[in-house]
Image: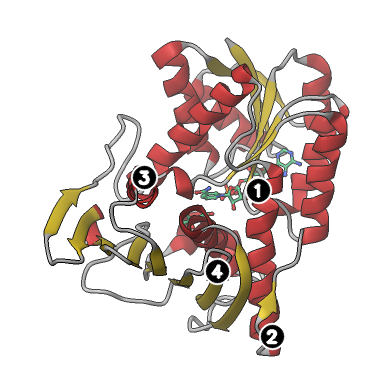
Amino acid sequence: MLHGALIGCGFFAINQLNAWRDIAARDGSADIVALCDTNAERLAEVAAAFGISRTYTDAAEMLERETLDFVDICTTAPSHRALVELAASRKLPAICQKPLAPTIEDARAIVDACDKAGIPLMVHENFRWQSPLMAVRDILASGRIGRPFWGRVSFRSAFDVYAGQPNLATGKRFIVEDLGVHVLDVARFLFGDVLGLTARLARVNPDIAGEDVATMMLAHENGVTSVVDCSYATRLEEELFPQTLVEIDASEGSLRLSAGYQLTLTSRTGGVERHDLSPPLLPWASKPWHNVQESVLLIQKHWVECLLAGTRPSTSGDDNLKTFALVNAAYESAATGATIQLRDV
Ligand code: NAD
Ligand code: 89V
């Protein structure tokens, strides 16, 4: 069994701890043996809820005292660099939550530190691990709808994310950095790397500091043009949070992943196939978060498999730098009105 420690016992860590407990119960391949949070009260509450007795308010002390196989960092972005560098200094493989860092310079420093230490780094970029989105990618890879030439990856909602994550209301950058990073990653996952990006951003909600609407157009290396759009200012008849919808037009047909995880495949000759891709509701999950919660379990299982096999995680640091570059490009494009050409990161 791999022994891990989790740093940052806040809002989202509960999902990660539930998924670790699930993995330990399913096959015993990994478990969390120690917890760290600078907030002693929160630390005690979460430790009691998960029955983890080894707790620390200082990450360096925890890494000094515990014998670990990996560390799972679930703090917010400003602390990621120092915490990953701490893990790297002890040659301890690390998972780090998205967004990897507040700036691309810090994100590169994180990836460099892990490369120099020779340790695996996985960014907890879980959206591409949602089972409906993996099914879409499998259909594309199978060639069933031919060669894609256009796509849309869309996340539009009026869900009150600020209630659970109040820090999201205060940053100068909001939706592209926090949510767009996931949706842009899904676009890369489906259509591959990007040559150029054009973006327009808006703030509709007057009570937050950053932008809550983003529309981005991506020119992919393989010739696909995609639109990636995100909004937390969109009131719909049916609230779809946190569903990501996908539209793909291709040479032999089209694909639509619509509300309620409903997939429609239409062939060039007009044949229509429908599939229900609803994700399972895991025992510890709750709607509407269950698709995200399933993806947390799947990405953590992937990490364990990679660590045991010595293989590179799908969302390695290097891979995630390419998604991070799209986030940066979106802000730059919106500020300048220009299309940003993506260079090597
Ligand atoms: P949060 O503020 O609720 O929790 C962060 C916790 O980290 C707090 O309890 C804080 O006391 C602790 N902390 C901060 N610095 C620390 C340090 N140096 N050492 C130890 N503990 C420290 O934040 P959150 O909403 O849980 O978000 C955490 C991360 O998860 C963010 O990067 C966020 O973007 C990400 N997130 C990801 C998803 C997803 O689907 N992948 C969803 C929600 C949040
Ligand atoms: O991923 C996140 O950080 C979350 C959510 C899934 C709600 O966008 O803010």
Residue 286 pos. (x, y %): 31, 42
Nearest-to-viewer mark from 4 and 3: 3
Q: Which residue is drawn at 81% across and 54% down?
A: 106
3, above or below 204, in the image: above
Q: What element carries label 2?
A: helix
- Say left or right for 225 vs 170: left
Cα separation, mark 2 vs mark 4, equals: 15 Å
Please tell me the numbered disc located at residue 175. 4
Residue 260 pos. (x, y %): 22, 56
Cα separation, mark 1 vs mark 2, equals: 25 Å
Q: Is mark 3 on a helix, strand or loop?
A: helix
Q: Are marks 2 and 4 in contact (CB under 8 Å)?
A: no
| Residues packed near mark 3 inside 10 Å, few (<14), some (14 to 19) or many (20 plus) | few
Of callouts 1 and 3, the N-terminal one: 3
Residue 77 pos. (x, y %): 70, 52
What is the three-letter code of the residue carrying label 3?
Asp
Residue labelled with disc 3 = 138
| Residues packed near mark 1 inside 10 Å, few (<14), some (14 to 19) or many (20 plus) | some
Cα separation, mark 4 vs mark 3, equals: 28 Å
Q: Quadrant of the C terminus?
A: bottom right
Q: Is residue 76 visible?
A: no
Q: Are marks 1 and 4 in contact (CB under 8 Å)?
A: no
Q: Residue at x 65, y 71 (%)?
A: 173
Of callouts 1 and 4, the N-terminal one: 4
Of callouts 2 and 4, the N-terminal one: 4
Residue labelled with disc 1 = 319
Residue 337 pos. (x, y %): 65, 90
Please tell me the numbered disc located at residue 335. 2
Q: Is mark 1 on a helix, strand or loop?
A: helix
* Disc 2 residue lies near ligand 1 with CB under 8 A: no
